[in-house]
Image: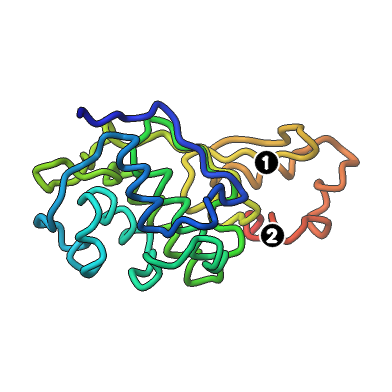
Amino acid sequence: MPISHPLAALLLQTNPLLPHLTPLEHLALYSALYGINSAGYGSDGVRAQAGKAAALLPVEASTVAARCSLPVELFHRPAGLLSGGSQRKLSLAIALLGSPQLLLLDEPSAGLDPPARRDMCDAINMALRGWSSPRKDGSSGGGGASSAPAIVLTTHYAEEAMALCDMVGVLEDGTLLASGPPEQVPQRLRAVRPGHYLADPEEWGAVLTSLLG
C-alpha cells in the first residue's frame, strides 16, 4: 500500500485522542491510515533510543514519537490516563506522522512545563527542517525546504513566536494589529493607532512583554 501524505494536519488546542487507546495504538492506527508499514529498527539513532516497545511500530512512527520526547514507558498506558504534557506530545507526533504539506498548530505548548515546552519547540523546529517522516531507506524525510511543511502557529508565548516564526502577526479581538518579521513587529505595534492601549508599553500584557525587549 503506498504511503499517503495528507495536504494538511491540525493540532488542536485540546487533544483529540481516544482515551481508551494507548499511544502505541494511536500511532499504529494513524500509521495504517497513512499506509506506513515499514518495520525494524533501521539505522536511525533516535529510533534506537525509543526502546523495545518501538519495535511494534513502523520506523516512521517510533522516530516521530522519540523526537517529540514521548516517553516509551507510556506507550502502553491509555491516553486518558496520560498527563496533559504527554497528551500534547502524542498529539504532535500524530500530526507530524504523515508528513503534511501544511501543519496548523493551535497553541502546541499549552499545558506544558518549561522543559517540555523547549522539547516541543525543538520538535517543531525539526519539522520545519523536513525530518518528520524518514524514508524507507532510513534517511530523514528530506531536510531541505522542498520537504519541510509550511507551519501556521498560534501561541500566547511571544518567545515561541520569535524563535519559531519567519513572520509574526498580533491579533486582538479578531483584528490584525501588526505583522511582519519578528524583529519588526515591536516597532509596528508601537505605531498602533493613537489612543489605543497597546500604544503604551506599560499596558502590554505578559504575552507581548518579551516582544518589546
| Of the image marks 1 and 2, the number of the one nearer the N terminus | 1
User: Residue drawn at (43%, 31%), measured in percent from left and top?
Assistant: 102
Q: State the residue position of label 1.
A: 170
> What is the residue that sits farthest to the right in this orientation?
195
> What is the residue that sits farthest to the front in this orientation?
20
- Assign the C terminus to one quadrant of the image: bottom right
Q: Which residue occupies the foreground of this view, 13 or 56?
A: 56
Q: State the residue position of label 2.
A: 209
User: Residue drawn at (31%, 34%), measured in percent from left and top?
Assistant: 34
User: Residue drawn at (74%, 45%), measured in percent from left and top?
Assistant: 190
Q: Secondary structure at mark 2?
A: helix
5 with respect to 205 (left or right): left
| Residue 74 x/y as whole percent | 40, 69
In the figure, 189 relative to 55: above or below? above
**Kind of residue at disc 1:** Val
Q: Which residue occupies the foreground of this view, 29 or 146?
A: 29
In the figure, 170 relative to 119: above or below? above
Q: Which residue occupies the foreground of this view, 79 or 95?
A: 79
| Residue 88 x/y as whole percent | 51, 57
Q: Secondary structure at mark 1?
A: strand
Task: Give the CA separation, mark 1 to mark 2.
Answer: 13 Å
| Residue 174 x/y as whole percent | 76, 33
180 with respect to 139 (left or right): right
Q: Residues within 10 Å of mark 2 (few under 14, many from 20)?
A: some
